[in-house]
Image (spheres, coloured by chain):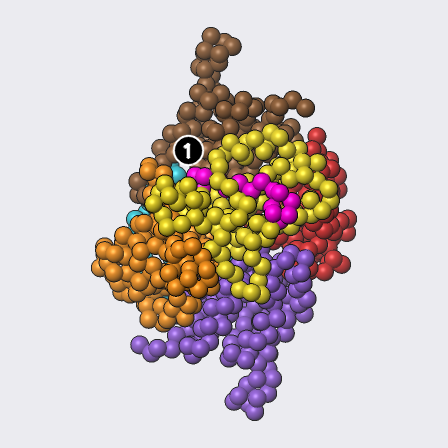
Chain colours: A yellow, B red, C brown, D cyan, E purple, F orange
């Protein structure tokens, strides 16, 4: 079965990003496909590579990058939400004259159409948020 | 069509579970996750509304990982609520026709 | 499987206190280009999204309430408002914007997009959706 | 000592206002802000509990800017609740001995 | 004005569902170095913070529940738990960690930090605080 | 009167950061002092200089920087919360080998002791959050 995942909350403050990660991992382990993971609202904050959590805590952002690396997941952060919150790739950073990209490996920035497309293409859309 | 309803908020703090139970169809399932797992316990101010919905045919499940995190053992869960793990969560989502998240 | 699905937006939050109302509307507008069936449900505090006379200068935030009136032009004309949620909040349909659309199958006659729904109808809307977007 | 209690959540969605009114002292003030302003309106399922608390001597205020944003005009506000602006919010905080935010 | 104030922490959220419980504890531990009077109130879902037997391996998050037992060593021994909140949730004090401290004024005798409080006592705790920290 | 402000939520998703800003501005305009503004939890995300909101919307982060510039406010982001969420100054960025600082002008990174000190020194602590 093909799942699409929407994540509305950033790492650490709310459990939503953790639950979404655990669900996605379990879906893959049980033979399902992940069509796309779409990060919306504060969820775009999962896409920063600048996070440095304490060593005895999980690194939510890195967990996503690793999972995507291993299973070739499509991690999309909403462009409008990302701009508001300061998540940038090379192009965006250059275009807005900011210091450097801070988007984490395997994440890409795109529009809300990617969420609609995920809804159309996937068998189930799962929304995780607060 | 049958729907999987997920509730991730405490019934003592938010109205999510109330609205969910008001609008749910009898052949559907409620999965309690995150802070919502406290709704699955016996002898709380929320227990009766869950028992009533069960009588109507609504099925209930609770995420065991979230119960354990909060020190709430499975033997305190209302009879008839099944304890599932993340794989069970995935299976529930696959087994129903759509998913309503009461955020 | 047909590529036309029923997208049902469940709006349960008041506007401005959180960004969800605004962002739900953004998805609806973008989604209109995909020619899917679209239904908007306003329940619980979501009914506040449609109140008339919103004035946001005082809180320094963008007033997006006028955008709802444009939904008809995007062929989004299935708006469902929970009657119980209105009653619990001392509101009636008169307190909400009267959203309309022009019916192309009826010589572009202007018709209301607003539907007051009860508990059972809301149940059906959730149950019949292909994709539920929760805000 | 008197306390300013701020409630920023809708009484229809959360238990913040309920807990606030349960624990408040009669000489204190509740200020409704953000999504909490809907609690200030007449003829809602929350109105009675506010009227009861008023009878006990609790004072109520509501932030006008947040009312306006939500299209809720001041003439719908329960009699006896004063409408204040941000400067009034500041003044209320200064006039009480401490501030409890029911987040 | 004395520089010693009464810092009262109002904990109303369950642990792990949000970060507030953990972060409240962090402030309490750091705050201990400032030698202020400290009171911890657990009310509403905050009472879940103190449950025994928390096991977080399954959710992949750090288990910080054992840290509460160290509060006594930081001279944080005024712990107030709302009895109504416990009752509403089908819990009793037996379900919570039995936090203790050693009383230096009483030959380091081990004493309980836990106080079950009713509505009126909670009211007083809020009213008497110099600084209320809300989590 | 001396106010201390604590902000628990980031910009845009919840109104808390906006309300805190409006309160702080009104307090200053009415002759009060702001001892410190402390950004905690997701509140640290108010301290990014990478945010680029749409032109017809407010820029919450820039509003804080501007207000601080004008009235010499002490804006402190909690170091542990900032590290988790990827808010860095020059030192932190260098130390953790990240691309560049992204902390906004007039914000500084420090520890939770700054919050306790604010509670001790200020006449009132105001907490804004979700």
Task: Please name the residue shown 57% across and 29% down the image.
Answer: C7
Tell whether position F88 is magenta. Answer: no
The image shows residue C50 at horizontal and vertical percentages of 44, 32
Whether residue D85 is visible: yes
Please, is residue E131 above or below residue C67 in the view?
below
Say if C134 sits above or below B67 in the image: above
Residue A117 % position (x, y): 56, 31
Q: Which residue is mark 1?
A: C51
- Residue farthest to the top? C107
Is residue F76 rendered to the left or right of residue A19?
A: left
> In this view of the protein, which residue sits in the foreground, D62 or B1?
B1
Please give the chain letter of the residue carrying mark 1: C
Is residue C17 something that shows in the picture? no
For this orientation, the residue located farthest to the bottom is E107
Give how far across and how far down residue C98 sits, in percent.
Answer: 43, 24
Q: Residue at x 46, y 33 (%)?
A: C26
Quarter of the image that includes the N terminus of chain B: top right
Residue range (magenta): A67-81
Residue drawn at 53 percent across, 34 percent down: A114
């Amino acid at each position: 079965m093909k799942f699409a995942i929407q994540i509305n909350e950033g790492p650490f403050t709310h459990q939503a990003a953790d639950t979404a990660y655990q669900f996605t991992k379990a879906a893959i382990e049980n033979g399902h496909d992940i069509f796309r993971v779409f990060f919306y609202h504060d969820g775009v904050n999962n896409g920063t590579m600048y996070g440095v959590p304490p060593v005895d805590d999980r690194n939510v952002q890195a967990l996503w990058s690793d999972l995507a690396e291993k299973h070739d997941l499509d991690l999309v952060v909403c462009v409008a939400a990302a701009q508001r919150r300061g998540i940038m790739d090379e192009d965006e950073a250059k275009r807005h004259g900011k210091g450097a990209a801070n988007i984490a490996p395997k994440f890409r920035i795109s529009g809300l159409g990617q969420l609609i497309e995920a809804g159309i293409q996937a068998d189930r859309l799962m929304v995780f948020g607060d | 069509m049958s729907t999987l309803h997920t509730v991730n908020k405490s019934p003592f703090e938010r109205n999510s579970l109330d609205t969910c139970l008001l609008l749910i169809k009898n052949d559907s399932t409620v999965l309690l996750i995150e802070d919502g797992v406290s709704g699955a316990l016996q002898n709380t101010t929320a227990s009766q509304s869950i028992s009533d919905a069960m009588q109507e045919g609504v099925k209930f499940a609770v995420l065991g990982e979230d119960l354990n995190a909060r020190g709430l053992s499975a033997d305190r869960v209302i009879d008839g609520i099944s304890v599932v793990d993340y794989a069970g969560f995935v299976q529930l989502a696959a087994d129903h026709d759509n998913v309503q998240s009461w955020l | 499987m047909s590529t036309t699905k029923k997208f049902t937006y469940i709006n349960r939050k008041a506007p401005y206190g959180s960004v969800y109302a605004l962002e739900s509307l953004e998805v609806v507008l973008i989604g209109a280009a995909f020619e899917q069936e679209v239904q908007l449900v306003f329940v619980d505090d979501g009914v506040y999204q449609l109140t008339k006379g919103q004035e946001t200068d005082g809180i320094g935030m963008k007033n997006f309430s006028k955008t709802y009136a444009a939904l008809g032009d995007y062929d989004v004309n299935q708006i469902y408002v929970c009657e119980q949620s209105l009653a619990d909040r001392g509101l009636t349909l008169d307190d909400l914007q009267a959203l309309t659309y022009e019916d192309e199958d009826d010589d572009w006659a202007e018709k209301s997009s607003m539907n007051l729904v009860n508990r059972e109808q809301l149940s059906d809307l959730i149950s019949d959706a292909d994709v539920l977007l929760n805000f």
